[in-house]
Amino acid sequence: MEGSVKCDANYTPLTPLSFLERAALVYGARTAVVFGDKEYSWRDTRERCLAGASALARLGVGRRDVVAVLAANTPAMYELHFSVPMTGGVLCTLNTRHDAAMVSVLLSHSEARVFLVESQFFAVARDALAVLADAGASLPLLVTIADGDGIGSDGVPEYEALLRSAPRGFGIRWPADECDPISLNYTSGTTSRPKGVIYSHRGAYLNTLAAALGNEMPTMPVYLWTVPMFHCNGWCMVWATAAQGGTSVCMAGSLAPKTVFEHIVRHRVTNMGGAPTVLSMLVNAPASEQRPLPVKVRVSTGGAPPPPHILAKMDELGFNVVHGYGLTETYGPATLCVWKPEWDVLPAAERARIRARQGVPHVMLEGLEIKDPATMESVPSDGRTVGEVMLRGNTVMSGYYKDPAATAEAMSGGWLRSGDLGVRHPDGYIQLKDRSKDIIISGGENISSIEVESALFGHPAVLDAAVVARPDEHWGETPCAFVTLKDGASATEADIIEFCRTRLPRYMAPKTVIFAELPKTSTGKTQKYLLRDKARAMGSLPKLSTSKL
């Protein structure tokens, strides 16, 4: 239109870095991060992030350089979500449950320039670097995150020491283009084909606002970190707490029910999140460990669909659960089961059944459809016709790192194809029915059945094997292996499980092994749907005792 211009006065590339700048200005003296007896204000946090960026830049980190991090939910992990992109670099947070073999693969694929490792994971990192060294690969510069006085494990420089010695006055390297990468998140991977999802500054900014709005985060919320920050950048809640001037409460040690309730009461937590595993843990905790909540706590959950009875019990305890659905490719949750007041009068069981649906798009997602993947036509909204869940909009990934073919396949037809199957109800809310890719979601983490099957086939007694999901009261789902032994061979369930644990991260190993002939089609393909029915018929594995959490 005549008279319209685009200039510095009316356009700035979107980036979540701006949330930190505003938080330090508006909420400077308020607490930003709590970790045990440590507290940092928003002014402190900004200064620490700038010092971290200055230190990384001095180590050679520049635009589009990848900085890998292997750490739990700590102040350093929180700060690196700002300090790395302040350098123009790309943050790559690694799953702390990965073993050395997987970590080495991801370090190699990401070409990480610097690798920051919390002391408790140092042995895994050291072994991963040894694998790279044996292969003749270039090694990232190693930095430890510890509570020492400047020296980490084996004499490696430590994070706090770098912050103290970093030159002050660092100038933030703002993105030249809002579509520049801000983070790299790995969905899953094998030694041959890891998949790294690229997030942009723009997508992270918009999804952060969607996360804050969808989870009804008030101004100055108190957010309890039960979601790993390595998972989709904490579902973008790292940046959302900055946007709202909130307090991030980080917990040291294991995620135990007693500890969660104590933190909620002590800090008057308003918001938290977690996989259905976390919900199950809280509702099944002994009454002696549960505490009356001082305020209503808003809980976002996603991953495996939460059982309705768990949702009902959470409501009884004083939690307000919002169920969502998403992928690493959508910056975490992309849909929400938005609650309507007319549902308040329904019986508890019916309310829980509605809450278990995956819902509608959040405010920053442009499209959510259930489509026939062959014709790309939307299925009827009848709650019965099954199709593939497809999404599109500004909060869909930029693509898979170094894998244009996989990117093109995932986004063919102008939609992100989730590979998940579901239905749309007459009110427009979607509900998942199955996973076409046979992915098992255990404790919020994706497990490839193919990877587990590959390990099983390595056992000398195994002739045939297939892996499906079995319901689990604690983890939501766990791998269930159906195994056919070779003639004359013998093996027990314990033998098979232990064999897999030596070749896979512990969480990927089967929790159940059934010895049987596998059902086949006329062409020799395993009929996994029959095995899934058998696994479901066995019922849920009992929850773990709190001593094993």
Image (cartoon, rainbow, N blue to C red):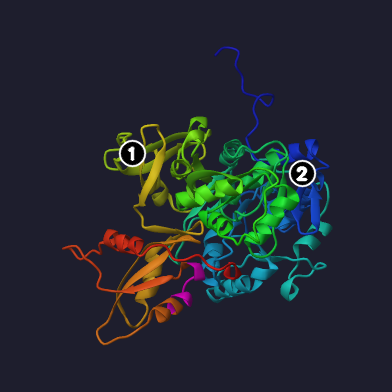
Return the x and y of residue 219 as percentages of the image width and height.
71, 36
- The magenta region covers 499-507
The local crowd at label 1, few if under 14, some if 14 to 19, many if 20 or more residues have their Cα within 10 Å, is some
Q: Amino acid at mark 2?
A: Gly
Image quarter of the N terminus: top right
Q: Amino acid at mark 1?
A: Gly
The residue located at (70%, 38%) in the rendering is 244
Residue on which the image places disc 2: 171
Does residue 320 lie above or below 191 as drawn? above
Query: Was residue 484 drawn as part of the magenta stretch in this picture?
Result: no
Contact check, label 1 and label 2, Cβ < 8 Å: no
Give the CA distance from mark 1 to mark 2: 54 Å
Residue on which the image places disc 1: 383
**Which is in the foreground here, disc 1 or disc 2?**
1
Return the x and y of residue 546 as percentages of the image width and height.
59, 67
Q: Secondary structure at mark 2?
A: loop
The numbered mark, 1 or 2, whose residue comes first in the sequence reads: 2
Splitting the image into 4 quarters, where does residue 130 fall?
A: bottom right
Along the viewing direction, whichever of 66 and 202 lies nearer the viewer: 202
